[in-house]
């Protein structure tokens, strides 16, 4: 199937599918041109396991910002071992990283939102763009209940990325944390141990912190910006859908 063949009625049908049906459809129709992108949140853990029930050969990629928590690197290794996968790692461009560090230092993300977004652009967004060039179907772990900003996440949407159309799937868009934990426990899945330490959303060291009881789900990300708004995004998921 070609991405151009996917019209609105097909997108509507995909939006009505279960997570399992959506993953099967993606890998059946696009093979290696479909890939799961994960930063080893719990949703990524579940999506990889659901995919493994249909096929032994599926692509998974992660953005290694070079500032991940040791527990996240452990989770990557554990998933590779359990599923016999080689998880593709996309890292920051060396010269862009050096230029940023020379200008602003390692901790520029504390300065203001623009510098945080610049750091995320160099360490996450640009490597993610490189990953997206290798695929037509991008499978993510986004969920509606993560923040006000993410309430409108759809299970299936056509997005435009550098002039190309990509089908972006979020199979767990409607799942809540209780259902995700149930799936992890019932299937004894290896997961990122930061979730046992109070974290609810995982990114880089310093920029992701554990939640205090009662805080919104993404309050632990860049928490020094919490008083501004809850549009706390690294830029990977801010591309709008085109209908
Ligand atoms: S999460 Fe923090 S360290 Fe990681 S890329 Fe974004 S601003 Fe930089």
Image (cartoon, helix red, strand yellow):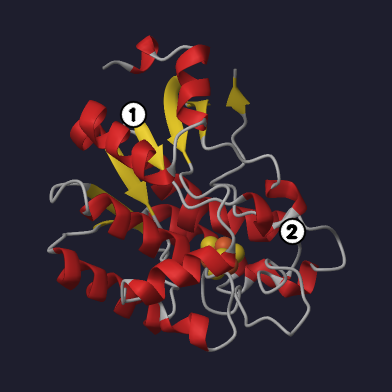
Secondary structure under badge 2? Answer: helix
Residue 136: mark in rendering = 1
Whether 106 is drawn above or below 127: the answer is below
- State ligand 1's quadrant: bottom right
Secondary structure under badge 1? Answer: loop
- Relative depth, front residue between 174 and 75: 174
- Residue 138 on image: x %, y %: 39, 38
Q: Quadrant of the N terminus?
A: top left
Q: Which residue is mark 2?
A: 113
- Residue 207 on image: x %, y %: 61, 73
Residue 16: mark in rendering = none
Residue located 48% across and 43% down the image: 170
- Among the two numbered marks 1 and 2 on one chain, the one whose residue lies closer to the N terminus: 2
- Determine whether, in the image, residue 33 is placed left or right of residue 238: left
- Residue 43 appearing in the image: yes
**Residue 186: quarter of image:** bottom left
- Relative depth, front residue between 161 and 120: 161
- Residue 181 on image: x %, y %: 48, 72
Q: How far apart are labels 1 and 2 at the CA level? A: 31 Å
């Amino acid at each position: 199937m070609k991405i151009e063949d996917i019209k609105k009625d097909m997108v509507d049908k995909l939006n009505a599918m279960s997570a399992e049906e959506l993953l099967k459809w993606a890998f059946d129709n696009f093979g290696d041109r479909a890939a799961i992108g994960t930063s080893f949140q719990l949703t990524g853990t579940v999506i990889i396991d659901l995919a493994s029930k249909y096929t032994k050969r599926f692509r998974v990629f992660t953005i290694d910002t070079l500032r991940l928590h040791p527990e996240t690197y452990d989770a990557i290794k554990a998933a590779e071992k359990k599923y016999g996968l080689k998880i593709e790692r996309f890292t920051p461009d060396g010269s862009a990283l050096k230029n940023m560090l020379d200008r602003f230092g390692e901790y520029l993300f504390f300065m203001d939102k623009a510098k945080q977004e610049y750091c995320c652009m160099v360490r996450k967004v640009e490597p993610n763009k490189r990953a997206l060039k290798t695929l037509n179907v991008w499978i993510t772990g986004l969920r509606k209940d993560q923040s006000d900003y993410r309430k409108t996440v759809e299970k299936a949407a056509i997005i435009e990325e550098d002039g190309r159309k990509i089908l972006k799937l979020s199979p767990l868009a409607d799942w809540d944390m209780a259902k995700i934990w149930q799936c992890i426990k019932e299937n004894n899945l290896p997961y990122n141990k930061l979730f046992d330490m109070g974290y609810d959303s995982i990114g880089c060291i310093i920029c992701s912190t554990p939640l205090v009881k009662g805080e919104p789900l993404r309050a632990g990300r860049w928490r020094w910006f919490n008083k501004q708004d809850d549009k706390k995004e690294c830029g990977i998921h801010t591309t709008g859908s085109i209908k």
